[in-house]
Amino acid sequence: MFDFTFHNPTRILFGKGAIARIREYIPQGARVLMTYGGGSIKRNGVYEQVQDALKDWQVWEYGGIEPNPRYETLMPAVELVRREGIDFLLAVGGGSVLDGTKFIAAAVPFEGEPWDILEKRAPVHAAVPLGAVLTLPGTGSEMNGYAVISHSAKRAKLAFGSPLVYPRFSALDPETTFSLPPRQTANGIVDTFVHVMEQYLTYPVDAPLQDRMAEAILLTLIEQAPRVMQNPTDYDARANIMWCATVALCGIVGVGVPQDWATHAIGHEITALYDIDHARTLAIVLPAVMQAKREAKRAKILQYAERVWDIREGDEEARIDAAIQRTREFFESVGIPTRLSAYGIGREAIPAIVSQLREHGMTALGEHGDITPEVAGSILELCL
Ligand code: NZQ
Ligand code: ZN
């Protein structure tokens, strides 16, 4: 196992009525900005619950943060926070609202052009404190220090991370997810699945606890996905999916082990160019990464095949093929196509995606750093 330092400061408030509990963790007298997305919270009762919880605070609102939150949308909120002396941010929504709010938090005290935090990896020395009310499990943003922000003028989608943007708390009430459309429920399941795979499907380092925690999340997702897809108001299934998503990317699964993240890096470029949902890009790219890297990942794919899919028959090549096929079928089972062609994207798109990777310095991806832009191109061929 590799050496590591692990610290996660986010307090999780989980369960029915969790939103009311945020009152205990917002500083008295704070000037609060509540951020949200396109309005789903006004149709499912979440907005009222948050308003009730915040009635003792002075509150500003900033709505309209879109999926794949854009720099252009977030900068007016940065100005608002600076102008009004707001000193606490409360993000209410899915991963996009949380990520966008993390960017606002880091951008407010930043001297210079805040986009440099993403493009030039400028260090974040301060951030406005934030909390979250999560309504879409999947990204793990509710308990991590990462955010992914898009810049439409530059056609870029880039990530940053800082210990200063972990939410102080996140309220997770599974009932808030009852209103999710099937497409977003499925996106969350697949995003969670791939977060685990990025931290698990690499090479063995004799870390059986991390392996079994990863496998536990994958098995739970496979078990719970049909329940939640069939019955969107099954509280326990929603709760199980929600906790899987949080645990998958709060850092605990990935400590002390190699990590991949090539699927995410390639997927972000596909979203930036073709506006395909984040999770859908992952469902396209992961099976191809498994295929292209079957030698380097051999031991872990075989372990995954046996422990997650109970594949025990056939020689090693057949078991690896079957594991890739079962992975693809799982994504398809929640309604997510796994081929670029299903999204109307053909071979002609590959050079543009590859050149975006090069432009963004994504030239040594994967746990061995050997996925060059050329290799990424051959992975994309396998996605067609
Ligand atoms: O905007 P509203 O009206 O709220 O509607 C949203 C949005 O249209 C809707 N929605 C959310 N909760 C709902 C709901 N609709 C009905 N009922 C509810 N309870 O769902 C739509 C999608 O929301 P979005 O926040 O975009 O989805 P998701 O949570 O999948 O977030 C995706 C973003 O997170 C980034 C992705 O790249 C993408 O930009 N990621 C962030 C990560 C992180 N911070 O660690 C890691 C991930 O790998 C990922 O990259
Ligand atoms: Zn993801």
Image (cartoon, rainbow, N blue to C red):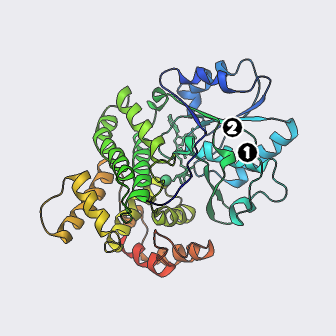
Quarter containing the N terminus: bottom left
Image position, residue 21 (x, y; %): 59, 21
The reply, left or right, for residue 129 in relation to residue 44 is right
Q: Is residue 355 above or below residue 64?
A: below
Q: Which residue is mark 2?
A: 130
Residue type pointed to by label 1: Ala
Determine whether the beta carbon of the residue marked 2 sits less than 8 angstroms from the nearest atom of ligand 1.
no
Q: Are discs 1 and 2 less than 8 Å apart at CB?
A: yes
The reply, left or right, for residue 183 in relation to residue 152 is left
The reply, left or right, for residue 193 in relation to residue 306 is right
How far apart are labels 1 and 2 at the CA level? 7 Å
Residue at (19, 65) in percent of width and height? 319
Residue at (49, 58) in percent of width and height? 276
Tell me where residue 132 sits by quadrant: top right
Tell me where residue 87 sits by quadrant: top right
Label 1: which secondary element = helix
Residue 88 in sight: yes
User: Which residue is at the front of the view, 89 or 233?
Assistant: 89
Q: Earlier in the sequence, mark 1 or mark 2?
A: 1
Residue at (35, 32) in percent of width and height? 237
Dot 1: few (<14), some (14–19), or many (≥20) neighbours within 10 Å? many
Quarter containing the C terminus: bottom left
Label 2: which secondary element = strand
Image position, residue 210 (x, y; %): 39, 51
Image position, residue 190 (x, y; %): 40, 50
Image position, residue 94 (x, y; %): 55, 41
Q: Which residue is mark 1?
A: 105
Residue 234 in sight: no
Determine whether the beta carbon of the residue marked 1 sits less than 8 angstroms from the nearest atom of ligand 1.
no
Residue type pointed to by label 2: Leu
